[in-house]
Amino acid sequence: MNKFKYYFVLLLASIAIVSCNKDKDEPETVPLRDYKVQYAADNDSIVKYLKTHYIKEVTANFDITIEKIPAGGTQTSIMYQTDYPLQTRDVYNHDVNYKVYYLTLNKGVGQSPMNTDRIYASYVGSLLNGTVFDSSYGLGRNFELYMNSSQAVIDGWGEIFPQFKTGTPNAAGPDGTVTYKDFGAGVMFLPSGLGYYGGGADNIPSYSPLVFSFKLFDLQRLDHDGDGVLDINEDINKDGYLYDLRDTSRFPTPPATMKDDTDGDGIADFVDTDDDGDGFSTYYEVTKPKEQIGWVNGVFNGVSTYYPWDPVTDNPNTPNVDETEPRGIPRRPTGPLKTEGDTESINNPRSFLPEDYTAPVRLRIHLDKTYPYQKL
C-alpha cells in the first residue's frame, strides 16, 4: 500500500512538472500596442535621429553614408542640411495620420510606379542604431508594392517609391546583365507601423523604426483585377496611389481623397471587375469586336484585343509589324442607330464615330453605367 502511494505521488509530481514545462514553452500572447501611441514614440525617435545624424557622403552612383554627429561636431544634421532637403509624405494607415520623412538623392527620369505595381530596385535596410539588417548588395530585385499581395513588401515602400521615377537601361553586357543610369534614388525613414510593427522580422526587433536607402531601376505595370485596364489607368483622381478600402483594419475611416471608386460600391476600380456597376464586366466593355481588330477598310485598328487608354507606339524592334493603336477606349457611341426609328438598346446600338474614340474628355464606356445598357 505504501509502495502504491509512493508511485501515485510520483506520477502526480511528474504530471505537474510536465504541465509547468508546457505552460513555459507556449508563447505568451501579447496584445499589439496602440498604433497611435506607438507612432508618437517612433516619430520622436526618427526626429531625434534626423537631428543627430548627418550625410557623410553621396557617391556618383547615389550610395549614401550616414553617420552620427560626434560630440562637439559641427556637421549639419539630416534635418537641416540643404543639399538633399528633407521631404515628408502624409500617410493614413491603421487610423493613424503618419508623416513619413524621406530624402531624394535623385528623382529619376522614367516613370513613377503606382503603389500597386511591380518594381525592380535595390536597397539597404538598417535600424536607427546603424545596424544593417538586410541588403540587396547593389543588385536589383523584383518587388510587388501592392500591400494585399502575397509577395508584397512593407506598407512604407508602397508610399515612398511612387515619389520617384525609374532609370534608363544601358545596353546589356556580354553576360546579358542590364544596368541602369539616371535612376531614382533616395532614403526613407519609416515608423514601425509602416514596417514590421509588433511582428518584427529575423533580426529586426518588434516596433522598430526603419531606414532604407534605395534605387529604383525599372517597373512593371499590373492589372490586379484582370479587366484589361492597367491599375495606373484606374487611378481616378490621378494621385498615383490606389487603396482597397475594404481592408477596414488599415483604413477604418479613410478620407475621400483615397477613394478611386467610379460606381461607389466600396470596391476600388483596380479590384472591381465592373467599374461602373452597370451589370456588364469591364473586360466585356473594353474588348474589341473581332471585326475591329487589324486592318479594316484600309485603316489599321491595332493588334490589341483591348482599347488602350493611350496610343501604343510602333515597336522599332519589330519592323514587319505595325503595333500603332490610333484609338483609345471609346465613349458611348453617338452615331446612327442600327435600325433607325427603333429604341436604342443592346440589340439596336448606335455606331461609333471617329470622335467617340478620340474626344479628350470623353467618358469611356467602361466607366459609363448607361452603356452597354443597365441590366433590368
Image: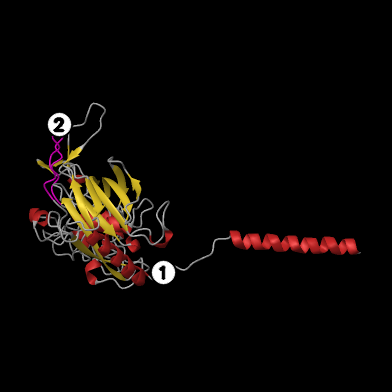
Which residue is located at x 34 percent, y 63 percent?
193
Asked if residue 177 lies left or right of residue 80, the reply is right
Q: Position of residue 340 (x, y in %)?
A: 13, 61
Which residue position holds label 1?
Answer: 33
Secondary structure of the residue carrying numbered label 1:
loop
- One can see residue 340 in this view: yes
In the foreground, 189 or 289: 189
Q: Main secondary structure of the magenta part?
A: loop
Residue range corresponding to the magenta coloring: 310-327
What colour-coding does the image apply? secondary structure
Image vertical order of residue 143 relative to residue 39, above or below: above
Number of disc labels? 2
In the foreground, 195 or 323: 195
Which residue is located at x 25 percent, y 64 percent?
47
For the C terminus, give its image quadrant: bottom left
The image quarter containing residue 26 is bottom right
Image vertical order of residue 121 relative to residue 38, above or below: above
Q: Position of residue 121 (x, y in %)?
A: 26, 45
Asked if residue 346 lies left or right of residue 19, the reply is left
Question: Dot 2: within a 10 Å radius of its alpha carbon, few (fewer than 14), some, or many (20 or more) residues?
Answer: few
Q: Amino acid at mark 1?
A: Arg
